[in-house]
Image (spheres, grey):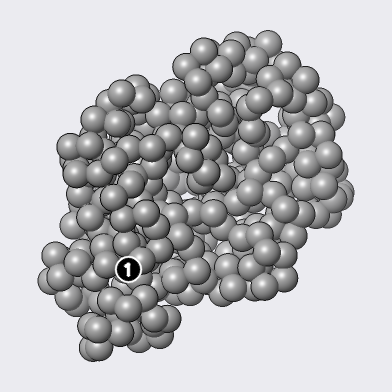
Amino acid sequence: MDLEKIASGARLSVVDAIKLYELPLFSLAALADQVRRQRTEPEVVSYLIDRNINYSNICNVACAFCGFYRTRKQDDSYSLSYAEISQKIYELEQVGGTRILMQGGVNPYLDYSWYLELMTHIKENHPTIRIEAFSPEEIKGLAKLTGKTSLTVLKDLQAAGLDGLPGGGGEMLVDNIRKAKHISPARISTAEWLHIMSEAQSLGLYTTATMVIGFGETPAQRVEHFLRIRELQDQSLSKYNNAFSAFISWTLQTQGVRIEGKVPQASPHEYLQNLAVSRIFLDNINNFQASWPTMGHKIAQTALHFGANDYGSTMLEENVVSQAGAKHNNTAEKEIIRQIKDAGYTAKQRDSLYNFI
């Protein structure tokens, strides 16, 4: 293995990337950190003040790893009103927030007009807040609900106020993993997820790429996921000059959900290893986010030396991975700054487009 080539940031083959998993962990970290320092401000780690808003937990996809979704008949199912959503945004505005990340279940009981009018309501009442909402899975659900194409749905939402599409639902972009019977057979396919992301990028919408490890996938399958992201990134940068702004990965959380005990999950060692490989292999994405909500602050601090240049967000509210066992949520800005400084970096607030504020 040509370590000098790797450290230079040169494009790696799939075979080279798979071999990276064989390196000692801290040798891999050194390579990833060297690559990261070539592509981002070396001594700066960014963070965002935002809020997750889960507008509804009613969903008909029923993934086995999700502890958040409910059927409409369950007592604790809900769909928020516009007033309730506005109150949450108001609380974000009071602490200097700049973005909402809004996702819910694939809810066939909300009218299409509800989504469009929600975008308009937010823009009229909270004009300084960016709306990044609705995963590709939700866009697919709206297309099915309306009989429209996914591109038309995206155009309608954008016209109403949508600014970006978050990368939720990416998990593992390898269909024999993601659609396995014991995982999520009804889940959006890899090709559909990538297609909807490409459509969003063609419209100039902000997008992020995500990954979840711990389903029992091999290093080769993890690299296959990276390859699909890298190929779409190349395509979208060339065609639209708009592509994924960041890559965000974390480990599968299984506490109290149907998949618990049926998959091996992934250790903190694997998380850091996978993060480092992703930083090296994904040479066309600049920003990599540490995942403190799933890994905790100590591992997130360590991730800053394994290729991550962003600490993520304050996440004033998080209801999805926390329902499957993630215990770390809702961290104050001053705590994030402290964690970044303790790791040896300068903390800078950013907006969702990775511009420093």
Kind of residue at disc 1: Val
Image quarter where the N terminus lies is: bottom left
Q: Is residue 79 above or below residue 303?
A: above
State which quadrant residue 134 falls in.
Answer: top right
Residue at position x 82%, y 47% from top? Answer: 155
Q: Is residue 37 left or right of residue 31?
A: right
Tell me what residue is drawn at x 23 percent, y 55 percent. Answer: 305
Viewer can see residue 183: no
Identify residue for label 1.
Answer: 35
Q: Residue at x 52, y 13 (%)?
A: 94
Residue 260 percent location from the top left of the image:
31, 45
Can residue 11 be seen by looking at this rendering?
Answer: yes
The number of numbered badges drawn on the structure is: 1
Q: Is residue 69 left or right of residue 259?
A: right
Question: Residue 326, located in which quarter of the rendered image?
Answer: top left
Where's residue 178, x and y in %?
48, 60
- Which of the pair 10/256 is nearer the observer? 10
Q: Dot 1: few (<14), some (14–19), or many (≥20) neighbours within 10 Å?
A: many
Left or right: residue 55 compared with residue 32: right
Residue nearest the observer in this picture, 46 or 114: 46
Q: Would you identify the image quadrant in which residue 19 lies?
A: bottom left
Left or right: residue 9 versus residue 343 is right
On the image, the x and y values in percent for residue 56 come to 61, 27
Q: Position of residue 143 (x, y in %)?
A: 79, 48
Look at the numbered disc 1 and give the secondary structure of its residue.
helix
Depth check, front residue: 2 or 158: 2
For the point 37% across and 31% down, the residue is 322
Vertical placement of residue 279 versus 253, above or below: below
